Image: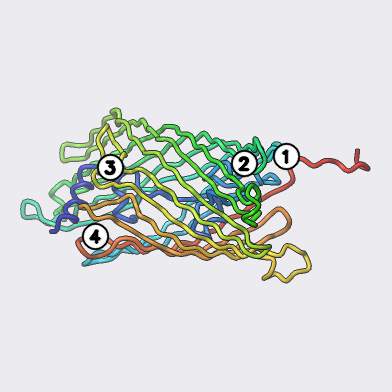
Amino acid sequence: MNKIKFLFLLIFALSSTYNFAQEDFNGGSPYTVFGVGDNLYYSNNRTEGMSIMGIALTGDNVTSFNPAANYRLQHTELAFGFRYNFLRTKSDASQSDNTDANISGFNFGIPLQKDWGMVLNIGFNPSYQINYKVTRLSSQLGEPVTHIYAGNGGLSRINAGLSYTPVKNLSLGFEYNYSFGNIKKLAVLDFTDPNITSTYQRRENDLGGSFVKGGLVINIGRIFKELKADELSIGFVFQTKLKLSSTLDKIYGTSLGNDSTQVPGGDIEIPEMFGFGITNKFGDKYLLSGDVVFQQWANYKINGTPDPNLRNSMRVGLGLEILPNARPDRPFLVKNAYRFGVFYDKSLYSINGEGVDGYGASIGMGIPLNKFNSIDIALSYQTRGKTTNGLLKDDLLRISFGVNFGELWFLRPKDEDK
């Protein structure tokens, strides 16, 4: 057995946890055994088809990534999105297929004072996901035994933020986030011989903590008119370190019976994150936006100890949007927005000193239902890792679906209605 396969199995055994009902663990990428799993990278329904986080992308869409980018929201908007994932994981000897569906985000934007760009955003957004299941056959005491290592869960956040334009062409944003979650891991030794008692160990870790975000968007095209690009904007976002406290439930099952204990789970420190973006609109037809996000995963700690299998991550995305023609007499195909994007993901995982990198592409469409309501659909493909040197290769096909409900928040009554 090579080192990487042994490492995966060893870590599964040491961190094995939660529900011994195996049907609770559907399986996914074994890479998510490290840290708190995959970063889900969600901003809003619009950016799903553009492969970006929308750090400098403004407009009439509530976003959950950079609070400063909400300052142009003209009406109250309630937006939620779903993702359906098809994952294929390959090694040099086998492959497995898994599917799962989840909520990508639920966000509410309320313009409080349009002249000041003051917009309140409130949301619930999943942040990190753990999902894996691995089985291995061996023998103990001359009897065949199946080893099962599995885990699921992750972290979500509840956020509340505010954007504000203190001066023309500059928007500032601040957001408070409470992060919480539950991580479950399981290890089972399942003997074929019914006379030998199978054993299990499960652990359930409840986590909670808070962090803040700060951001800004500057319309440099209107400040520097010699650029002749009125819609050229740049954006920045910074997220503070997240310190999670936890409680840990341990349950054991052996030939002597079952036992359970609850102990402090220790602190987990998720490192700070920051990003930069740029957006420009070309006439009334095209919009180009790109951004890069960094997170210092080398500073991740659990009980004060770094994880040697994590490294600093970087995600770079570039997206194009073909803008719709909103005139009511235009054909259906012309009134839709069409989106395309590509991205590169230097993931947080580093196995035996070798980084796990990925890349992908997406297409999407925004379909207006009326002036204030719309549907967004996106299809994306991502690949990461490889099957050489004992690593694993993940191929992910994702379908995203989002709905945006909106209405005018404050309407000045017409004179005849006063």
Q: Which residue is mark 4?
A: 391
Q: Earlier in the sequence, mark 4 or mark 2?
A: 2
Q: CA distance from mark 4 to mark 3?
A: 24 Å
Q: Position of residue 235 (x, y in %)?
A: 54, 46
Q: Which residue is mark 2?
A: 170
Q: Which residue is mark 3?
A: 17
* Tag 3 near tag 1, CB within 8 Å: no
Q: Quadrant of the image for the C terminus? A: top right
**Mark toward the viewer: 2 or 1:** 2
Q: CA distance from mark 2 to mark 3?
A: 48 Å
Q: Earlier in the sequence, mark 3 or mark 1?
A: 3
Q: Is residue 48 above or below residue 79?
A: below
Q: Residue at x 66, y 46 (%)?
A: 72
Q: CA distance from mark 4 to mark 1?
A: 54 Å
Mark 4: secondary structure: loop
Q: CA distance from mark 3 to mark 1?
A: 53 Å
Q: Earlier in the sequence, mark 4 or mark 1?
A: 1
Q: Quadrant of the image for the N terminus? A: bottom left
Q: Position of residue 80 (x, y in %)?
A: 57, 50
> Which disc, if any, is residue 115?
1
Q: Is residue 193 above or below residue 268?
A: below
